[in-house]
Image (spheres, helix red, strand yellow):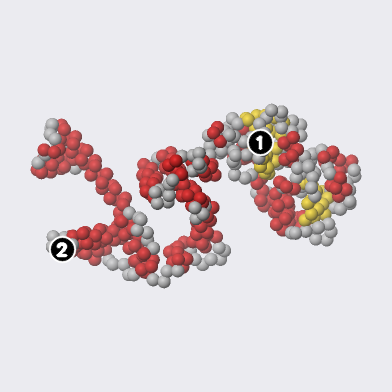
Amino acid sequence: MIHVAPLGPGSADLLTQETVKLLRSGLPLILRTEKHGVTAWLTSEQISFTSLDDFYDRFDDFDEMHHAMACRLTELAKDQDIIYAVPDPSTDASVFSLLNLTEDVHILSGVSLAGYWLSRLPAGFPRCESVRTASASILPDPSSDSALLITELSSREIAGEVKLCLMDIYPDTLSVVLLTEEKAEILPLYSMDRGENYDHLTALYVPAIPFEERTRFQVEDLKKIMGILRSPDGCPWDRVQTHRSLRKYIIEEAYEAAGAIDEDDTDHLAEELGDVLFQVIFHASIGEDAGEFSLTDIATLICQKMIRRHPHVFLKDSDRGPESWEDLKKEEKGFTSLSESLEDVTPALPALTRAVKILSRTYKTLKARPEETVYEELKSLTDDLETSSDRAETLGRVLLVISELCRILELDPEEILHQAADAHIRAIKNLEIFANKDKKSLKTLTEQEISVYLRMVSGHGRA
């Protein structure tokens, strides 16, 4: 059995009678670290002990270190009961690792670091009903919804890492409290790693920030904003929206994000991706209110899909590589025929994009036609347009063959058509410039004049 004894924040006066009795029992005592105020008392009581301080020098990765500590303790406890003493078992990652290795663990109760440090906060410093406590080595994602107490700032380097993590969500100048055995110091967040004395009992208190005063936000915050907007006291427009009424917006926002990519403007892209994310949150809110699905369901489904579709990454000894994506997809959906796979391509896609996807799936199963054959069919179809009884059908086949050429040439038909449209706009703009110089109106230009101007625009006439 491994008895985990809480040593508390440093003073032997804060040890519980149960812990004192255990420490005096004569069982082998292993301290996580000797750098603790209780070690002097242990020496005065002639209680012998060893420590795991050497692990800090042997490991650069905290997860590996905590696992190694737990393995060492379980090895020592094979033949006899031992005592493992830590400041606070409730926040100690080595204790968590120990619990994952064995059930033969008995944890005593004691004074928590959280309770002690909170009692040490300076008078008048903002308190919060909700306080999350975490070790610096297993820091959770920052959130300014509740106050945060971070323990075990054991070195200046660790304090620096914690600072960078916090500054991703909190203002650099936010007043925080650095807590040591000697004092509780109020200082700006950006300077929390500029002190000289850090040890395993150093802690940091980060207050909560009112929602309206924040300058940085996370996805969870967007969910809360959505909840406010759709509440009875929120926005009337947001409250009445449905999946169907929002359909056009998610398409528009996706296209605007694609436009920002084309502009090579990362700031604009971040803004537009925010609009796309808002649409996802919006649909999740509607789905949750209707009992259909939640944001967690959305995240679960995509995470499961990504794990299934990447066995070469997530499954050891898998013989299926990245090229097996489509086969895995067919297996998941139970497709037994090519037509089922083609019907799975959503009609909501732009027509040219859908055509290329359908053709790509088709010719992964069928033998692809030679490029020359496709050109011949295109010429034949364009010749047939004059005599066709159904020009719409013939033009549809022309577009499909053009889509097939795009697939063969590995070109995106949507993209090249956009580029052609942009080139047309530039040509008309230049035509207007030449016509205006000659004081002519576009509406009155003859066919011959238009031809001349277009040649000038393309660089074949006077500049």
Position of 235 compared to 418: left or right?
A: right
Q: Residue beneath label 1, please?
A: 128
Q: 111 or 99: nearer the eye?
A: 111
Q: Please, what is the three-letter code of the amino acid marked with disc 1?
A: Cys
In the image, 9 versus 318, the foreground residue is 9
**Residue 156, position as x, y percentages in the image:** 67, 37
State the image coordinates of residue 217 (x, y, percent, origin top left): 53, 39
Marks 1 and 2, how far apart at CA: 77 Å
Residue 447 image-quadrant placement: top left
| Label number found at residue 312 | none
Q: Across the whole image, how many numbered discs are drawn on residues?
A: 2
Residue located 52% across and 59% down the image: 304
Give the residue displayed 45% in from the left and 64% down from the top.
Answer: 329
Say whether residue 299 is visible: no
Q: Say whether residue 338 is visible.
A: yes
- Considering only vertical position in the picture, is 121 above or below 224? above
Q: Which of marks 1 and 2 is nearer the N terminus?
A: 1
Q: Name the residue under label 2.
A: 389
Give the image quarter of residue 146. top right
Q: In which quarter of the image is the C terminus?
A: top left
Q: Is mark 2 on a helix, strand or loop?
A: loop
Look at label 2 and name its amino acid: Ser
Residue at position x 67%, y 38% in the image: 129
Q: Is residue 303 above or below residue 239?
A: below
> Counting other residues with Cα less than 10 Å from the Cα at mark 1, is it few (<14), some (14-19), or many (20 or more)?
few
Return the x and y of residue 293 as percentages of the image width and height: 51, 54
Look at the image and tell me in which quarter the N terminus lies. Answer: bottom right
Residue lying at the far front of the rendered structure: 232
Camera-side residue: 243 or 266?
Answer: 243
